[in-house]
Image (spheres, coloured by chain):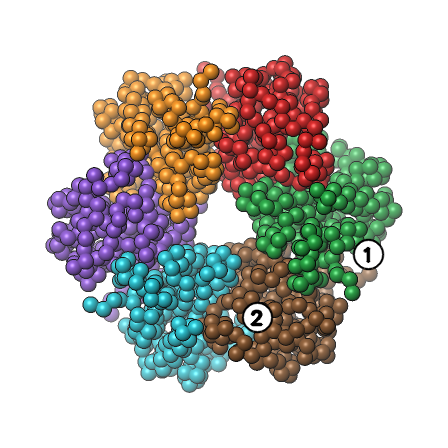
Chain colours: A brown, B green, C red, D orange, E cyan, F purple
Amino acid sequence: MSVPDRLAEMTTVEAAEAVARGTIVVIPAGALEQHGPGMALGTDLVRAEAVVAQVAARLSGRVVVGPSIPVGVSPHHMAFPGTVTLTTGTFAAVVREYVTSLHSHGWTRFLVVTGHGGNNATLTTVAQDLLVSHPGIQLAWSPLTALAGDAVGALEPSAVHGHSGEAETAQMLHLAPHLVHTDRLEPGTTTPDQLDDVSRVARHHAQPALTLPYDRLSPNGVLGDPRRVTAEDGAAIVAAVVGRITTFLEEWLAA
Amino acid sequence: MSVPDRLAEMTTVEAAEAVARGTIVVIPAGALEQHGPGMALGTDLVRAEAVVAQVAARLSGRVVVGPSIPVGVSPHHMAFPGTVTLTTGTFAAVVREYVTSLHSHGWTRFLVVTGHGGNNATLTTVAQDLLVSHPGIQLAWSPLTALAGDAVGALEPSAVHGHSGEAETAQMLHLAPHLVHTDRLEPGTTTPDQLDDVSRVARHHAQPALTLPYDRLSPNGVLGDPRRVTAEDGAAIVAAVVGRITTFLEEWLAA
Amino acid sequence: MSVPDRLAEMTTVEAAEAVARGTIVVIPAGALEQHGPGMALGTDLVRAEAVVAQVAARLSGRVVVGPSIPVGVSPHHMAFPGTVTLTTGTFAAVVREYVTSLHSHGWTRFLVVTGHGGNNATLTTVAQDLLVSHPGIQLAWSPLTALAGDAVGALEPSAVHGHSGEAETAQMLHLAPHLVHTDRLEPGTTTPDQLDDVSRVARHHAQPALTLPYDRLSPNGVLGDPRRVTAEDGAAIVAAVVGRITTFLEEWLAA
Amino acid sequence: MSVPDRLAEMTTVEAAEAVARGTIVVIPAGALEQHGPGMALGTDLVRAEAVVAQVAARLSGRVVVGPSIPVGVSPHHMAFPGTVTLTTGTFAAVVREYVTSLHSHGWTRFLVVTGHGGNNATLTTVAQDLLVSHPGIQLAWSPLTALAGDAVGALEPSAVHGHSGEAETAQMLHLAPHLVHTDRLEPGTTTPDQLDDVSRVARHHAQPALTLPYDRLSPNGVLGDPRRVTAEDGAAIVAAVVGRITTFLEEWLAA
Amino acid sequence: MSVPDRLAEMTTVEAAEAVARGTIVVIPAGALEQHGPGMALGTDLVRAEAVVAQVAARLSGRVVVGPSIPVGVSPHHMAFPGTVTLTTGTFAAVVREYVTSLHSHGWTRFLVVTGHGGNNATLTTVAQDLLVSHPGIQLAWSPLTALAGDAVGALEPSAVHGHSGEAETAQMLHLAPHLVHTDRLEPGTTTPDQLDDVSRVARHHAQPALTLPYDRLSPNGVLGDPRRVTAEDGAAIVAAVVGRITTFLEEWLAA
Amino acid sequence: MSVPDRLAEMTTVEAAEAVARGTIVVIPAGALEQHGPGMALGTDLVRAEAVVAQVAARLSGRVVVGPSIPVGVSPHHMAFPGTVTLTTGTFAAVVREYVTSLHSHGWTRFLVVTGHGGNNATLTTVAQDLLVSHPGIQLAWSPLTALAGDAVGALEPSAVHGHSGEAETAQMLHLAPHLVHTDRLEPGTTTPDQLDDVSRVARHHAQPALTLPYDRLSPNGVLGDPRRVTAEDGAAIVAAVVGRITTFLEEWLAA
């Protein structure tokens, strides 16, 4: 039987061997948050785990899939039932303790792949603090959709698009169609004139950056029109994302 | 299509409906820690999720399966490669923030089902602190194997048995045989005379309770002889555990 | 003059000598919480200190009685005036800092004897976290009444019994009769039918474990009937507890 | 039987009555730290509890003696065996949780009487933070010896005097002579020329304030000459301290 | 005399009036970190305060300049003497407490202008956590140089450029020439081939994002060639930044 | 060009040289809090920075002026608009991280000069905790006005005087007259009979020390009569303070 790539499926003996091989640990992080009336709360973890599985398949034996983080930083979605959020401090502690535990066994390189953009900032803060507390650790993180700008652009998404919109729905139609209720998909905010004044300011400027709750940005929690996309669209996005992460890891493994 | 019981598979609309139905949220908690030379590091989460799934199947629509906690409190296994541990403070924060997030949507009752005994104490501390900070919440927790005393006794386990021994291996042979390498299973510490002096004191007394690291209790991390059991043994244990938890939830739902 | 066993009564020179002798530090922990209409709030510390003093008398020169912890984890009694509680995090910090301070002087073995069951879980979490942060420390903890199952059984306590009930009152009648107002003792909840539905579920199952506030379990804060016991009953319980802890320490000292 | 003044000796019913009477809670705080070769580690708590008991006797029924804090902020004594210290954050948490627990039962005024000057600063920080978090609480704190300037001056103490010196030893000879080994008392640093250069700067200036460890200030941990005083000297100091605190409380009770 | 825009120069009466006018608070944040052999450690605060002063001059009476944050998140520069860093948790606490203090007086909108990119992630985490804890607050943050892409591009900077390079030096030549020692300016890493393998991977990919210490990226701490720019270049960058932030604030004030 | 004394104006090369010269780091700390109807909120930082600048001018090359702390511990002034406060824990973290960052570059001696008495206690707690965590650090702190008792006495201040009263206003008239609106200065509480009962108790006793909010002590936040003093009075106070701190530093540098 071949050695699994998922740490959870390895024995402690296999884990020791994976350290000795100089593997990089890849950790999927998600969120449990509203994805509009037609898509599952767990969407972000589903996508992160799927992408990580494909990356691991390409780099089998050279990376180790670490434990998932099923819940992320989602305070902006708390107005919508079912959303669970960690404070940024707790999310940071979880990442740090995953990484420092594994570092004590000898691993030095870690990539967190997050399906949820709300986790990005906290992941950066963990990497910063580790520079001083654990200088032997190299911690990287990666988003998903943001790596696939061309494929997303090809969808010609709505003027306002993003959370639970075209790109995210397409990925789910490809990866987990049973978690997309196509009959319940509804467009959310799709044009700037649907935004209130403050939200329009926030969307108009990428920077200065103004963080707003999603119930203010969109009554149903959706930015964009999720009805306009297909599983094929999602396949293109996922392929681009997997490619970019794989390339990054190959370069890092060789460095 | 029927409504899923897993929160991660629900939409936000379905989550709101689940709150309105008076459901109890059941959260599986595991650990990522050594389980000897022949069993997977993720054993505890596998068992917790499997038991919770069976309970949810019996109580479909009356409980909601909340997000998993894949990593637990495992400092006593950190000498063994691959083990990941959270500090008790971080584990507590994760549980508390899962529960308080869901409470803000209206849920009031929560059961954490932990496949790892190392999480028990911290779960109690979370329940205690919530009595003051969130008096509207009722938080319960449950172990697995400890609920199946009769079925475990029927295995006639070794004089010293426990972690990664007869009972745990049996469950995994039943629930996830691909994660048990029967050809690599090895007995660990099975009799008191194999223990060093301090470990013998610790095992001799349930209370006073002396916490020791597992590399001191057993060179290969195993207590008991995992070779002696079958999937059928495991099925009996799991059935007992599922039955006990289901009964508890039924009584609580009716109260 | 003989050397005292209480650290607070030693000089720094005597403390250095006690380290050199390989002593174990025994720390009494209590609570300041309601004990019904007839017994003092400080009951748990009184019992812990008394038991520790008797243990120290038996093992004089081989153990050191460390500083007491007068207030514990009592959120479940906060509905009753006079109760003081620490959060579990603060209680843990106190224990950890007592122990690590003394460890810096050379002590390596510690036993916390708690007169209050609400402290048990937090004591376990401290022991767990120390395994990683201070591997040179061995931390044990012990309850009181739970060590004396036979003696308690001999009292034939009420169907529902526990906090401030037969066993605890008996101990106080023996150890500190001036803190028991026998004319004000009142039975509390003594049978399951006096419990509300949720409390009955919680009491019915030891596990799954559901933590409830005591004002829900009993209007006067008492479980059992404290009027039915004598100082002689208490003497038997205390003797059993002292014996069990002494035996544990003797084995540990020899290991 | 009269109602006790110590909260630990009250029943919950008596505690409720004490709240209704508008009592002020007085909390003794000590330290467990070196007091030179001839005096007990627990000196500061002994003095604080004794003073508080005398104050309570004078104001019986108008004050309540709260739970003691046996260990304080003593990092400057950690070079001497037997010393136990809390970090300032943990000491602050203990005080805050004592006070806020009792405030939840209705008390609004609290006085912490500390036998150890190392606790002063942290007590001030607790009072400051409570102004915002709990504006209904009034928290005062008091030292001991510093209240008795005249009585201390009458001792004509050494040019360098303080910790474990004339004033503190005198109090102990009066309050707890069994904890003073007069045959082992030794002078410590008594004149500035015995100090090293940095210590001399620190002692020369009350402000700017430079905190130094006591093993730097004095090889045996003593500042002053503890052999020069009598129990009568201590009685005068204690009387002055008790008088000052009693006067303060009387004015506060009347305000 | 006209009312000042800086809160530190206002009286409490003027502050109350500024709240009543619906002002937005603008807070300058910097860093104290190496800026190569020729530029001052305080460069980032100098630039942030200067930009905020110019913005305030344009919007006088409509914004309030809040207290500066002179030290930021700079762990990546700690190998270079003089660098001071806050952990991300402490930096977050400072920002949060500035903002929540002012919110208690009635302000609801806040913009932090940071001269240091290392602060960006933590500022986002603060904004996220406030969404739940203080839903009445709107917190935005802004970088400096990143707002002036065109003006920076016009400099034709080195292939590798950034910290203490062309754009930052130009700004300082314009704003604070006495803090730039033009005779000591030295190029740092200017081309990818000067990077080691891991650093090249990190710079090659904007995302996945790999955080590295600056002593690895550049021996003298500089990315780019600071000798190639003039004060006029800096004036163009500053003008663009001030314009962008002013526009943002005007839109927000009108919303 | 001479080397600057302010760390923020040094290059990293100059910082390294300053460490090698055995310099002491002097850190100004202020507050942003009400100073009555006629004086600026930033008064305390202005005074601290001015005094530190004068001290540094006298000891140029032998001390380094570290980064300022513009906001301090001011919960007692939060009833007055514009006041910003840090919790004591956050203020302590800022000081500790300033100091430990600089200690990692080789500095060992630090003096915090605080223009705000509300910071004193927290500064002491930081110094205490560092004794254990960083024994190589010597941390001192200094107030301002309290060092100039004679000069303040010469003002013959009001019976009740202090915050924003004679001494503080005089210093500002000397150091920053543009921040004193002499036409708006108003007396605050100047005699004990103007205090309410509890405030009178608190002012009557220096110890026991009772911390009260300033809106209780004075309706306009002022203690004393700021109209009675001149810039010359302030010059005398500042000269005394600068002299005392300079003397302290000279002795310390020589030790």
Residue type highlighted by circle 2? Ser
Q: Residue at x 27, y 62 (%)?
A: E14
**Disc 1 on helix, strand or loop?**
helix
Q: Are marks 1 and 2 on the same chain?
A: no
Q: How many other residues sit within 10 Å of disc 2, few (<14), some (14-19) or many (≥20)?
A: many
Residue wearing tag 2: A218
Q: Residue at x 57, y 70 (%)?
A: A218
Residue wearing tag 1: B178
Q: Nearer the viewer, residue C169 or D185?
A: C169
Q: Residue at x 75, y 33 (%)?
A: B192
Q: How many other residues sit within 10 Å of disc 1, few (<14), some (14-19) or many (≥20)?
A: some
Q: CA distance from mark 1 to mark 2?
A: 45 Å
Residue type highlighted by circle 1? His
State which quarter of the image contains the N terminus of chain F.
bottom left
Please, is residue D218 above or below residue F122 in the view? above
**Disc 2 on helix, strand or loop?**
loop
Residue C180 in view (yes/no): yes
Q: Is residue A231 left or right of residue F246?
A: right
Q: Nearer the viewer, residue F169 or B186?
A: F169
Q: Nearer the viewer, residue C203 or B153?
A: C203
Residue B122 figure quarter: top right
Q: Position of residue B141 (x, y in %)?
A: 68, 44
